[in-house]
Amino acid sequence: MNSGKPASEQDRNRIVRLREAGLSIRQIAHEQRCTTKTVQKILGTALAK
């Protein structure tokens, strides 16, 4: 993920899959090179859909 740009659909799907696989939010943030706040925001909107 590039910082400063909105997450693409592909990035969102990857984050949701990693979370379902049991990774922590911190691990996902490190993997995607973004902040934990970004991961939480994406997971929150993904769960709302």
Image (cartoon, rainbow, N blue to C red):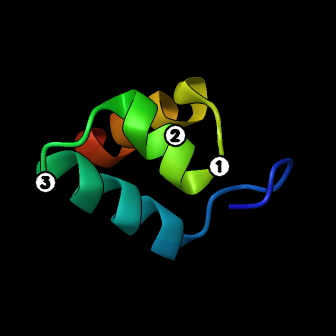
The percent coordinates of residue 5 (x first, y second) are 81, 56
Label 1 element class? loop
Earlier residue among tags 3 and 1:
3
Task: Say above or below: 17 vs 9.
Answer: above
- The quarter of the picture where residue 30 lies is top right
Cα separation between marks 3 and 1: 18 Å
The amino acid marked with disc number 2 is Ala
Q: Disc 1 residue type?
A: Arg
Q: CA distance from mark 3 to mark 2?
A: 14 Å
Q: Position of residue 41 (x, y in %)?
A: 49, 32
Instruction: Count neighbours of disc 1 (C-alpha within 10 A) and say few if under 14, some if 14 to 19, many if 20 or more.
Output: few
Residue at image coords 51%, 66%: 11
Outermost residue toward the right in this view = 4
Q: What residue sits right under mark 1 in the picture?
A: 33
- Cβ atoms at labels 1 and 2 below 8 Å apart: yes
Kind of residue at disc 3: Ala
Residue that protrudes farthest toward the bottom in the picture: 10
Q: Is residue 34 left or right of residue 11?
A: right
Residue that carries the numbered disc 3 in the rendered image: 21
Give the numbered dot on residue 44.
none
> Which residue appears at 14% of the width and 50% of the height?
20
x and y, in percent, of residue 35 in the image: 63, 31
- Please tell me how crowded label 3 is: few (under 14), some (14-19), or many (20+) other residues with Cα within 10 Å: few
* The N terminus - image quarter: bottom right
The residue beneath circle 2 is: 29
Quadrant housing residue 16: bottom left
Q: Is residue 41 left or right of residue 2?
A: left
